[in-house]
């Protein structure tokens, strides 16, 4: 048997990825289909000296994670649908105050209570625009059980490096399906930690290069005193009504993610060279897309696939390049059209785009996507 090989579900792999990244604090509220993440964290975190707490709701959960991160701990919460909606105000707070946390959203059908045990990919735009105001957002989208481990681990590295909340956008199928996974040797993993100042003297918690710089972050309780507020603030953290200061701060927050985009960008591609029909997808929809594209190739159809593993910031140039030689692009997704809007924007009017949405709570069958490929001939 292969060393470190295990049969596990996506939610379990996500939790193990967080633990491998150095997760020290989890606060959450049980909600289908993400509950297994909380259950496993409750079992495993105490074994490594971490802390688990079940909060009264999702608002309290993300707020507790922000507090733990300010105290120097790597923190995560997980939720779905209605809970993710409740977290949006604190997501904006974490963005403006530059507090690194990881939020896992295991998507289910909505709106409202919807169908809690059914598949959906309809939180894509909410992940980007759910909280009010312009704000930096980084979203990773696993498409397999192994990627639940890998991308959750990476989410912590990104959050700690750039002092930003990072969303891991899973879905019910990815979270609950089981696969054989070969986990990496823990000795090969080198989790990143945020950069900390070396002396309290003259410490400014928001002092950074205006061109996307990331401030050093001291932990509360380590002898540093600094002010944290959801108001626009100066380099010392003091609230300000200065329009110039607010503009500089917000532009820096956006710029730090823009500059990091080449490092954040992640994808999988299949048979793109010479492809006349390109399928662009993410998450569980991409599993069926891959089967359909491989069948198309076997039958002599020049089809290829691009699966996005990072969706925000949206990889415009990658999508444009991958579809530049195509005459048709097909976008399958478990919603009525969210990813397709970004694909259309990225590639412009040169290529015809087919929208393939599904909202009955069932996964795409490969033959459905293959039929769309055939229809594009």
Image (cartoon, rainbow, N blue to C red):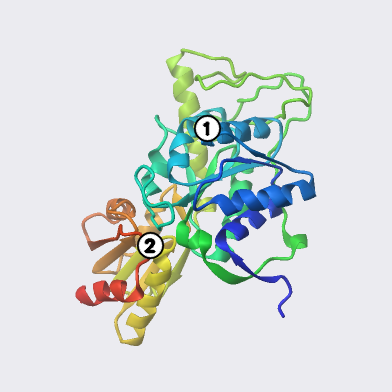
Q: Disc 2 marks which residue? A: 281
- Label 1 CA crowd tier, 10 Å (few <14, some 14–19, many 20+): many
Q: Which residue is drawn at 32% across and 51% down?
A: 338
* 76 or 95, nearer to the observer: 76
In the picture provided, is 82 more to the left or to the right than 349? Answer: right
- Is residue 213 visible in the rendered image? The answer is no
The disc at residue 346 is none
Q: Residue at x 30, y 69 (%)?
A: 325
- Label 2 CA crowd tier, 10 Å (few <14, some 14–19, many 20+): many
> Residue 73: x and y, percent?
70, 38
* 358 or 157, nearer to the observer: 358
> Residue 31: x and y, percent?
51, 46
Q: Disc 1 marks which residue? A: 59
Mark toward the start of the polypeptide (1 vs 2):
1
Element under label 1? helix
- Is residue 56 visible in the rendered image? The answer is yes
Q: How far apart are marks 1 and 2 (CA)?
A: 31 Å
Q: Residue at x 29, y 56 (%)?
A: 347
Q: Do the residues labelled 1 and 2 touch (CB within 8 Å)?
A: no
Element under label 2? strand
For the C terminus, the quadrant is bottom left
> Residue 144: x and y, percent?
52, 65
Residue 279 found in image quarter: bottom left
In the picture provided, is 298 more to the left or to the right than 78? Answer: left
> Residue 19: x and y, percent?
69, 52
In the picture provided, is 26 more to the left or to the right than 348? Answer: right
For the N terminus, the quadrant is bottom right
């Amino acid at each position: 048997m292969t060393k470190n090989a295990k049969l596990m579900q996506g939610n379990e792999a996500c939790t193990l990825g967080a633990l491998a990244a150095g997760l020290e604090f989890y606060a959450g509220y049980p909600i289908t289909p993400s509950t297994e993440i909380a259950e496993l964290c409750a079992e495993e975190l105490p074994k490594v000296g971490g802390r688990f707490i079940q909060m009264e709701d999702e608002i309290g959960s993300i707020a507790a994670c922000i507090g733990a991160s300010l105290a120097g701990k790597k923190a995560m919460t997980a939720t779905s649908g209605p809970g993710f909606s409740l977290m949006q105000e604190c997501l904006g707070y974490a963005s403006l105050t530059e507090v690194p946390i990881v939020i896992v959203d295991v998507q289910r059908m909505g709106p409202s209570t919807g169908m809690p045990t059914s598949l959906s990919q309809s939180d894509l735009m909410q992940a980007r625009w759910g909280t009010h105001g312009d704000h930096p957002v980084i979203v990773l989208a696993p498409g397999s059980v192994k990627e639940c481990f890998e991308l959750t681990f990476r989410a912590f590295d990104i959050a700690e490096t750039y002092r930003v909340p990072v969303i891991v956008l899973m879905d019910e199928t990815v979270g609950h399906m089981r696969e054989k996974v070969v986990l990496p040797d823990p000795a090969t993993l080198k989790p990143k930690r945020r950069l900390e100042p070396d002396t309290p003297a003259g410490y400014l918690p928001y002092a950074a290069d205006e061109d996307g710089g990331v401030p050093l972050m001291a932990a509360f309780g380590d002898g540093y005193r600094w002010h944290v507020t959801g108001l626009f603030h100066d380099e010392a953290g003091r609230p300000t009504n200065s329009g110039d200061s607010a503009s500089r701060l917000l532009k820096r927050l956006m710029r730090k993610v823009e500059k990091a985009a080449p490092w954040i960008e992640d994808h999988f591609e299949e048979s793109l060279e010479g492809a006349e029909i390109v399928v662009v997808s993410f998450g569980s929809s991409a599993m069926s897309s891959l089967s359909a594209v491989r069948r198309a190739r076997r039958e002599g159809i020049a089809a290829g696939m691009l699966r996005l593993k990072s969706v925000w910031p949206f990889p415009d140039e990658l999508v444009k390049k991958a579809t530049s030689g195509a005459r048709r692009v097909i976008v399958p997704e478990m919603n009525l059209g969210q990813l397709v809007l970004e694909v259309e924007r990225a590639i412009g009017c040169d290529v015809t785009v087919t929208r393939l949405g599904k909202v009955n709570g069932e996964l795409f069958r490969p033959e459905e996507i293959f039929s769309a490929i055939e229809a594009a001939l």
